[in-house]
Image (cartoon, rainbow, N blue to C red):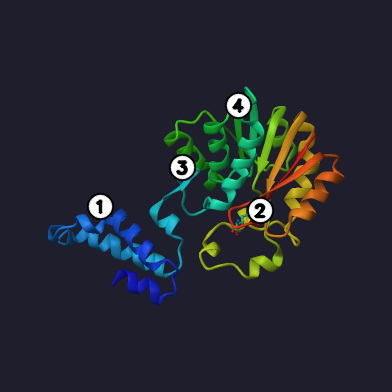
Amino acid sequence: MAKLKLAENKIENAHFDAKELFCKAFGKEPVYLDMSNFADAEKCSLFEQFIKRRANGEPLQYILGEWEFYSLPIKVGKGVLIPRQDTETLVDTAIELYKYKKDITAVDLCSGSGCIGIALEKNLDVKNVILAEKSHYAVKYIKENIKINNSKAKIEQGDVLSDDLIYRIPMSDLIVSNPPYLSSGDMKNLQKEVEFEPSAALFGGDDGLDFYRDIARLYKAKLKTGGHLMFEVGINQNNDVSNILLAEGFKNIGERKDLRGVIRVVFGEK
Ligand code: GLN
């Protein structure tokens, strides 16, 4: 019935979502249920509420309160961008370039839930990881994610484009960012689920490229020579972002594709 309600409301993975929400409400998989569970009115009503929220388009991840990124548990909820599988390409690329380096200082700008920076810390030989984020809603989740992942990452709260925040960022080997990159046009055609996510984490100015321009201009001075600035980019933004990096004097520009074959990462070396 729950699955039907989701399907009726055009939820794509109705079966998977209904099962996940069931497990969240009842604390076990449907196959392990016996009738006594259905007598638990509280759990039944919880499940009903979950299904109602999902049928209304709220992302599954917000209702579950946690999602996996790079095999790490990441707490999410209203006010923070949900980690995407596409973004694992950014972590893959950073690992590819830095796996033999020791004691690196890495910075994750516009870090949202903190998922990228924490994944770097867990997979590289890192001395410092700094997670820079403006939204206090997101910072609340970063704190939880640091805790549940036993992370030593440091939070710098503030606008990544402000002098005050830039001043607090040390000289780094690697600066990564999945900034807001949707254009005005994209914002008008959001998937229903994405509308629940904070627009500040999505909207990158008229052409979607504002953060790339500003971050490339402002943060080159924070990279050691030979260090990299590495971005996630939206579909078809790779040429524009490469040109922004070249115009700021970065060299050895590189690109990487995500699992769907979309160029998802653009980086340059100082
Ligand atoms: N990848 C996000 C989306 O699917 C956009 C996130 C961003 O702007 N960085 O819409």
The label shown at residue 28 is 1
The label shown at residue 180 is 2
Q: Amino acid at mark 1?
A: Lys
Ligand number 1: quarter of image: bottom right
Between disc 2 and disc 4, whose residue precedes? 4
Marks 3,2: beta carbons within 8 A:
no
Considering only vertical position in the picture, is 172 above or below 36?
Answer: above
Between disc 3 and disc 1, whose residue precedes? 1
Q: Which residue is mark 4?
A: 128
Q: Residue furthest left?
A: 36
Q: Amino acid at mark 3?
A: Ser
Q: Secondary structure at mark 1?
A: loop
- In three-dimensional space, the C-alpha distance between marks 3 and 1, rounded to whole angstroms, equals 21 Å
Between disc 4 and disc 1, whose residue precedes? 1
Between disc 3 and disc 2, whose residue precedes? 3
Q: Secondary structure at mark 2?
A: loop
Which x, y percent locates residue 84? 54, 52
Residue 81 appears in the figure: no
- In three-dimensional space, the C-alpha distance between marks 2 and 4, rounded to whole angstroms, equals 24 Å
Which x, y percent locates residue 265? 68, 48
Q: Amino acid at mark 2?
A: Pro
Label 4: few (<14), some (14–19) or many (≥20) C-alpha neighbours in 10 Å: some
